[in-house]
Image (cartoon, rainbow, N blue to C red):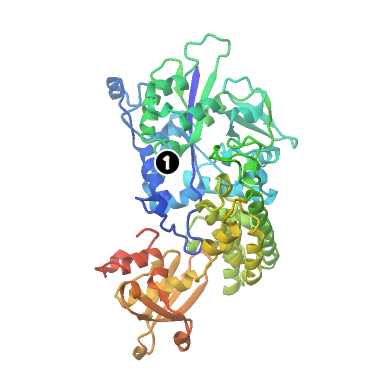
Amino acid sequence: MHSVIIHHHLYQPPREDPWLEVVPAEPSAAPDHDWNTRINRECYARLAVAEAHLRDRRAAARDPDARAGIARVVNLYAWCSFDVGATLCEWLDAEAPDTLRAMQAGDAASVRRWGHGNAIAAPYHHVILPLASPRERTTEIRWGIRDFRRRFGREPEGMWLPECAADEDTLDAVAKEGIAFTILAPYQVHGHDGSGMPVRWRGAAGRSLTIVPYDGSLAGDVAFGGLLRDAPALAQRLTPYRGATDPLAHRCTTLATDGETFGHHHRNGDATLTEALSMVVRQSGSRVTNSAALVAMYPPTTDVRLMSPSAWSCAHGVERWRSNCGCRLDSNRPPAQQWRGPLRAAIERLSHHAYEVFEREGRTLFRDDPWDVQDRYGDVVARDGEAIEQFARRELPADASVHQVQRARELLELARATMRTFTSCAWFFDEVDRIEVRQVLRYAARAIELTGHASRLMPEFVQWLAAATSGAPHAGSASELFVREAMPHRDATTCAAAGAIACASMGIATPRIATFDVNVAPAADARSASWRATLAHRRTGAIRTFVGRVHGTGPGLTVDLSETEADIGDTHGVNVHEFPEVLARQLLRPMALSDEALFDDVGPTP
């Protein structure tokens, strides 16, 4: 019997504004609002309703189940193994819930069909685990497991490692948390027979982990070649051993690649894959399955050695994420990624300060060890403000003050922001002046703010980043990028309050703006023409009240804002272009709508 497994690695980095918790407009993603929206339209949503032109329609009509053929419109999440990053799940939950539900339905269908689900877990953030500290590595794995359990309603059997980056400590940490298997490139393990069947890694501590090697040549031809233009050729590559008479009774071909390959990188790739799978399931001696079912049916009997450290996208171990190793996208230009090392050094230095604050203050606040509290935060980190508040109160003494509850929530958010600064794609590409680096630096700025030591740490961090430059003439540095596009030049709460007051002056209700719960009312003194806005941050619980007056209309609309009415005249006005995007777009429309229902829940998209 020849088994065929298709694994989709589905991931997007956290693109949200760290202060507003919504994804801002990304012009490079046009015609869509942002890259999450575009990739969902081109890929994730299409994988749930993939179309294929079957050659044997009568067989499919007789039996739309797997045994006779695949129906014309298919939820590929029910037929393909996949992992979906938690940061992508957060966005799907709010902006594309139908896609997330299709993933969950596909996993449930695979459990019914094969006894094991297609979905496998992943660390919460897409970080290079061999480069993470033991404490960070443990939290990432535990958060990923907790998020998977909540979204798919079962325990994960496998875990995908970001960039397939692995070393001995990483595999041991994964095995320690009860994970049964992972998927790695064939060149990352020594001692397998090339059959594609599960093999076993044994660690020095006595723990073991099953490894399913994928077909590296096939993955390369699908991702970078032309296989997704030829369904019969793809089907042939998926079943290369059909009719073979060699003594290996069982073989497996695992195609593991970025899920974005099917539709985003290669238009109509989802349809080609579906048609190829329909050909595979009609062949005698071949079957489509998933890694968990394969491992359960064929437990490994061969022990292998790990190439440690190693990754699927770096020929130099994991150097791509910390040095100028030569791995880059543009091979026609000489390596110029000298910025990678200094950028990682600056982020690691900042994380040391952030975790020092977290541990020192956490020990005075939490009833339990702060690191255990941080791990348990994974149960609610992707949930709403009420769940976060309830969690914080459970972790504090019963007599904790409101201020202590707020600071506890801020410390947990400090840990979250710090973890996000290690998102791997910041180091993956060739240039330092890119959207991925900018986003990591914005989370760094948020972490600095949450330490409570911004006046000292912010200028120090700018200095630490100065060496992160490609060295080319006139090339920018990470330091310049941080000052220009990451460091906050206007307080986000102030801008949201100004937008809320401007909307209120036009009769538009805004009970929620991004991550803020909002209450706006005319000031007590009706003669002052002022408005009072109170904003509560849903993640930290921080509450601030502002008083403001509105001036002008259209592009000249400005709100003079202060935290006391007496100081309004001494403040600089907040212009409409500084409001949260959704409010600015609405207020700048030629015919501004005043339908309150439109703004019952002002969220991330206009």
- Residue pictured at 39% horizontal, 45% vertical: 40
Q: Classify residue 600 by image quadrant.
A: bottom left
* Residue 425 percent location from the top left of the image: 55, 47
Vertical placement of 446 versus 227: above or below?
Answer: below
Q: Quadrant of residue 110?
A: top left
Amino acid at circle 1: Met
Q: Is residue 273 left or right of residue 410?
A: left
The image shows residue 145 at horizontal and vertical percentages of: 56, 45
- Looking at the rendered structure, the secondary structure element under dot 1 is helix
Q: Nearer the viewer, residue 293 or 217?
A: 217
Please tell me whether residue 28 is drawn above or below residue 596 in the rendered image: above
Q: Kindly identify the residue that appears in the image at 61 percent across and 30 percent down.
A: 211
Write down the residue under mark 1.
Answer: 103
| Point 63% across, 63% down: residue | 462
Is 30 placed left or right of 163 in the picture? left
Residue 396 seen in render? yes
Q: Residue 543, percent across and down? A: 50, 74
Q: Residue furthest right?
A: 204
The single residue placed furthest to the top in the displayed view is 245
Can residue 66 be seen from the camera position used here?
no
